Amino acid sequence: MDTWSPTGWAAIYETEVEGERQRRFTPIQRWGGDGEPMVVDDSEQHCLIDARTAEGFAGLDVCAQVTGVSPAAPGWSVSIKYPGGDTETRSVAAWVVESDGSAQPLVPEHTGEGPVTGLITAGADIVDEYRLQCSINVVPPES
């Protein structure tokens, strides 16, 4: 699961799109006064709501808990090797630090020729089935 939350929990939502069941994970932002899991709704107001009241709610699951974000020192990169041998290198912009002490690299979102539209975890924009065949390695700065 490529979901982080400040609580270490995510809500699972299931929907049917063109006859195919799809799962979506939404970070639990906090726990309500009565212990209800709170998520940001998809409306224009972006309010916190009880996760269980949103359409398609299927349950909760443990996810990575974010404890901080740190900018990356210059020179860190991620090398992505695709099946067939093509390789892509992306600069690491920041590190997401998880509660277990591990850090995940954030890289510019792949947009082809267009401008960078945001930061994502390395490999997050690769289709899941295809991602399993890729090799993603963090490359430290040259000494």
Image (spheres, helix red, strand yellow):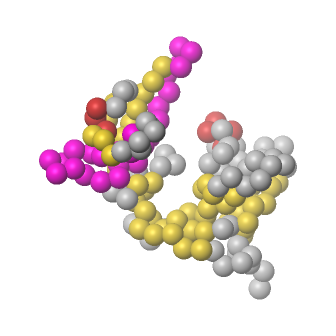
Task: Determine whether 1 is above or below 59 in the image.
Answer: below
Q: Residue at x 80, y 49 (%)?
A: 114
Q: Residue 74, how many percent across, how many down? A: 71, 78
- What residue sits 73% from the left and 66% below the top? 91
**Measured along the vertical axis of the image, is residue 9 above or below residue 55?**
below
| Picture residue at 41% right of the left edge, 68% below the top | 67
**Above or below: residue 58 compared with residue 134:** above
* Magenta stretch: includes residue 21: yes
**Residue 88 is one of the magenta-drawn residues:** no
Is 123 positioned to the left or the right of 111 in the image?
left
Residue 35 shows in this picture: yes
Res 50 quadrant in image: top left
In the image, residue 114 above or below residue 96: above
Can residue 137 be seen at all in this image of the molecule? no
User: Who is closer to the viewer here, 46 or 23?
Assistant: 46
Magenta extent: 17-41
As drawn, the residue found furthest toward the left would be 34
Say which quadrant the C terminus sits in.
bottom right
Q: Residue at x 77, y 53 (%)?
A: 115
Where is residue 49 drawn, in percent x and y?
30, 41
Give percent across and percent down for residue 101: 44, 71
